[in-house]
Image (tube, grey):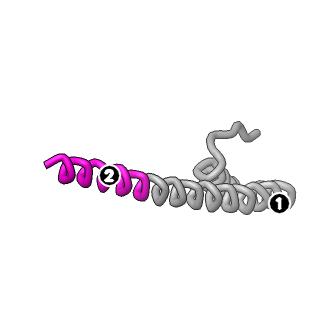
Amino acid sequence: MRKLILLTLVSTFAMSGFFNGEQMAQEKAQKEEAARLCKIYTEKTEKYKANMRHDDFAQATLANYERIENKYCGKKSHS
């Protein structure tokens, strides 16, 4: 009976560590991808601001770029 309990505890411990490590790796990959997309959209937004026209369509495009940038970078204040 003791061997069965010991086997159950060891198995549970081993499995919980395995799934936790896999989850941490997935979260790290998601953070790295978000950082990559943040950089891309930050550059895209700044480049668009520097060369944009001054009409409603350009303002809407800029707002969309800023929305996507905020999605990957977190909330920022744009002016």
Q: Is residue 17 above or below residue 51?
A: above
Observer-nearest of 14 and 77: 14
Q: Residue furthest right?
A: 50
Q: Which residue is mark 1?
A: 47
Query: Residue 30 or 24: which is nearer the viewer?
Result: 24
Q: How many marks?
A: 2
Q: Quadrant of residue 39?
A: bottom right
**In this picture, which residue range is highlighted in magenta?**
1-19
Local crowd size for mark 1, using a 10 Å CA cut-off: few (<14), some (14–19), many (≥20): few
Q: Position of residue 10 (x, y in %)?
A: 32, 52
Q: Residue at x 54, y 59 (%)?
A: 25
Q: Is residue 22 visible?
A: yes
Could you say where residue 31 lies in the image, as x and y percent from the top left?
Answer: 60, 54
Looking at the image, residue 45 sits to the left or right of residue 27; the answer is right
Please name the residue shown 35% across and 57% down the image: 15
Q: In the image, residue 78 lies at what x, y percent?
A: 73, 41
Q: Mark 2 sits on what residue?
A: 10
> Label 1's element?
helix
Determine the residue positioned at 63% across, 48% down.
70
Please state which of the two labelled residues, at mark 2 or mark 1, is closer to the viewer. 2
Q: Nearer the viewer, residue 74 or 62?
A: 74
What predominant SS class does the magenta segment belong to? Answer: helix
Check residue 6 for magenta coloring. yes
Q: Is residue 73 left or right of residue 8?
A: right
- Alpha carbons under labels 2 and 1: distance apart: 56 Å
- The residue type indicated by label 1 comes to Lys
**Could you tell me if residue 56 is visible in this image?**
no
* Residue at disc 2, secondary structure: helix
Place residue 51 in its image quadrant.
bottom right
Residue type, label 2: Val
